[in-house]
Image (cartoon, rainbow, N blue to C red):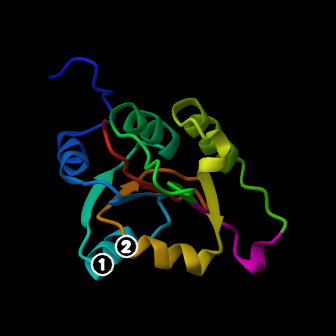
Amino acid sequence: MLLNVPKVLSPELLKALCEMGHSDKILLADGNYPGKSAAERCKATFIRADGIGVPALLEAILTVMPLDLYTDEPAMVMDVDVRDKGMKIPIHDTYREIIAKRDPRGEKAVAQYERYAFYEKANACTVIVQTGEEAIYANIILQKGVIK
């Protein structure tokens, strides 16, 4: 056991976060996301976090990993598909609040991408974490920053 490390960060996830370098990306995927096949396709490390929601994992990760200050969009969420237009995604507001507490840019650090554009961004991820999150469109990509 370690002091001051959030309990939702498994040893496997901590190792993956440590191995990520500046500008590497991690995807926190909801339970519906095709995480395993996406990880195989882009040769990303695939980690399961069953039973853990994305907000809890996001909060925990941001205690040990800074977001990239050298980009305007260090956090990216998936917008609703055109067939779901008008659907509200309250979990995105939760993400913005969590990130605003940890990043000097506040909510502006979170960009929203059309569904298929998001999938393209996800193909560049170093790590994909398949969570137990049940909310739809609850996927978020984080770009790691530099520890100064």
* Image depth: mark 2 or mark 1 in front: 2
**In the rendered image, the vertical position of residue 116 relative to residue 28, given as above or below:** below
Is the C-beta separation of discs 2 and 1 under 8 Å? yes
Task: Give the crowd class for mark 2: few <14, some 14-19, many >=20 residues within 10 Å.
Answer: some
> Which residues fall within the magenta stretch?
77-85
Residue under pointer 1: 42
Amino acid under disc 1: Cys
Residue 82 inside the magenta-drawn segment? yes
Residue under pointer 2: 124
Q: Is residue 146 left or right of residue 81?
A: left
Give x and y (percent) for residue 66.
39, 40
Separation (CA) of disc 2 from disc 1: 7 Å
Local secondary structure at mark 1: helix
> Can you say which quadrant of the picture contains the N terminus?
top left
Residue 44 inside the magenta-drawn segment? no
Say which of 56 and 133 sits in front: 56
Q: Which mark is residue 23?
A: none
Amino acid under disc 2: Ala
Say which of 87 and 96 sits in front: 96
- Residue shown at 85%/66% (left/top)? 86
Quarter-of-image position of residue 127: bottom left
> Can you say which quadrant of the picture contains the C terminus?
top left
Give x and y (percent) for residue 142.
44, 54
